Image (cartoon, helix red, strand yellow):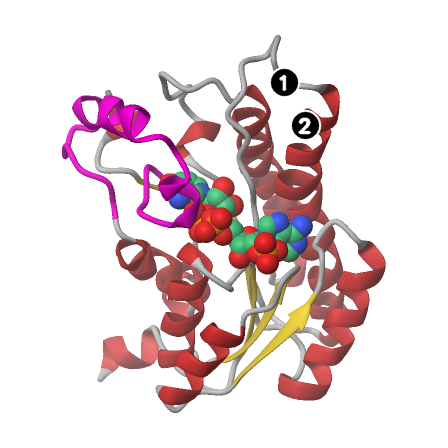
Amino acid sequence: MYLEELFSLKGKAALVTGAGRGIGQVVALGLAKAGAAIVIFSRTGADETVRLIEDAGGKALSLIVDVTSEEQVDKGLAEMMEFAGPPDVVFNNAGICIHKDTFGATIDQWRQVIDINLTGEYIVARAAGKIMHERGIRGSIINMASMSGTVVNVPQWQASYNASKAGVIHMTRSLAVEWAQYGIRVNSISPGYINTPMSADTPKELRDAWMPLIPQNRMGEPEELMPAILYLASGASGYTTGSDIIVDGGYAAR
Ligand code: NDP
């Protein structure tokens, strides 16, 4: 009972970006099962995720919001407040990856990756953090980083992605230190290779090349991120802020 209460999100409102599929979908469902009402931001909608949450007895709303647009994010948060109240938890998950070597990639592709992965997370964290601060909410913001923010995983070349995720880890620490005075906690999670539509888009030869480099010799499942995310989202992590939790089968430890 004690642990159940410690990890409970009953009565909380959680914003999850990019939860139409992949990691975001699994985490949105997990946070709903822990008791939170869920609001999802994505560009193409998350009806399937909403259905899964409702079937599990939860409450969810999908909004079309591009996280790179301040205006859309502000409007989305206003709609969230009508539906579920102000955010107590934010899982800042939306992201993309472009595998291109540096001479082959365009500057536009670099900008696109930084814009969604780093600036998008900043826009959402800043807007949600402002609401938390104004209302005295001791909220938790969890930013999606990656092991690629700590190590340069090979053999694919993805300098823009690696730089964006390293930026997320240090932005997280910066916001954590700045907002500790308001009781708002900010942490990041850094997965290794996880089975999702994003990784399934990767050619098989590349995925085969990853395996011997992963100490556990397998990819992770989105469900294996859930315990760390629930820890960061809930009161269980009350004294944890500015941290990055790596969940990567040992990749970054080599
Ligand atoms: P998916 O491609 O399966 O899902 C990404 C989600 O992000 C989609 O729902 C997409 O929805 C949304 N999204 C993308 N751009 C935007 C935008 N501008 N505004 C709003 N939503 C957006 O990816 P994963 O589930 O694999 O990855 C999720 C996160 O985890 C990413 O940040 C990724 O970098 C990170 N990660 C993934 C790893 C992996 O191995 N899979 C490993 C480490 C980190 P829509 O297109 O509808 O907008």
Residue hosting label 1: 105
Q: Are marks 1 and 2 in contact (CB under 8 Å)?
A: yes
Residue hosting label 2: 109
Indicate the quadrant containing the N terminus: top left, top right, bottom left or bottom right.
bottom left
On screen, residue 38 versus residue 197, left or right, reads: right
Residue 93, x across and y down, in percent: 53, 53
Identify the residue shown where x is 67% and y is 78%: 86
Residue 149, x across and y down, in percent: 48, 29
Residue 96, x across and y down, in percent: 56, 41
The image quarter in which residue 217 lies = top left
Identify the residue shown where x is 37% and y is 88%: 55
Task: Confirm whether residue 180 shows in the render.
Answer: no
Give the structural element (helix, strand or loop) at label 2.
Answer: helix
Disc 1 marks a residue whose amino acid type is Ala
On screen, residue 140 versus residue 121, left or right, reads: left
Indicate the quadrant containing the C terminus: top left, top right, bottom left or bottom right.
top left
Give the structural element (helix, strand or loop) at label 1.
Answer: loop
Is ligand 1 less than 8 Å from the beta carbon at label 2? Answer: no
Q: Which residues are magenta?
A: 191-220
